Amino acid sequence: MPRYNFKCSEAGYKCSYEVDGATSEELIPKIKIHARYAHNLFEVSENTLVKFKSAIKEKTS
Ligand SMILES: [Zn+2]
């Protein structure tokens, strides 16, 4: 089963937060909650969402 991993640093933040899940879709709400509390991003724009999605990597192991 593929596992997906998001690292906040991959999205351009100086932040050590990371989260993983079975699907990339499952990660989006978790990333949004993190962005709100850690980065004061109360509204996630389309551009920011694209940036977050591109930072989600599929684990090979
Ligand atoms: Zn972060």
Image: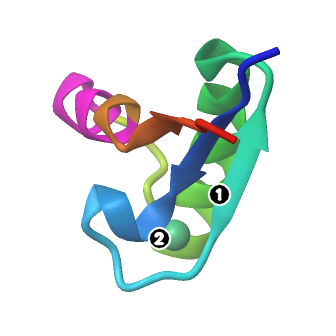
Quick check: is 47 in the magenta stretch? yes
Q: Looking at the image, do the residues carrying marks 2 and 1 touch, with CB atoms under 8 Å apart?
A: yes
Q: Amino acid at mark 2?
A: His
In the image, the segment drawn in magenta is: 45-52
| Magenta span contains residue 32 | no
Instruction: Look at the image and tell me in which quarter the N terminus lies.
Output: top right
Observer able to see residue 40: no
Give 10 or 51, whichever is nearer the viewer: 10
Mark 2 vs ligand 1: CB under 8 Å?
A: yes
| Of the pair 18 and 32, the residue shown nearer to us | 18
Is 1 placed above or below 4 here?
A: above
Q: Which residue is mark 1?
A: 34
Number of the label disc, if any, that sits on residue 11: none
Q: State the image coordinates of residue 41 (x, y, percent, origin top left).
A: 43, 56
* Mark seen at residue 39: 2
For mark 2, give the secondary structure.
helix
Q: Is residue 25 above or below residue 42?
A: above
Q: Amino acid at mark 1?
A: His
Residue plotted at (17% across, 31% down): 47
- Dominant secondary structure of the residues highlighted in magenta in the image: helix
Image quarter in which the C terminus is found: top right
Q: Secondary structure at mark 1?
A: helix
Residue 16, image x, y percentages: 57, 81
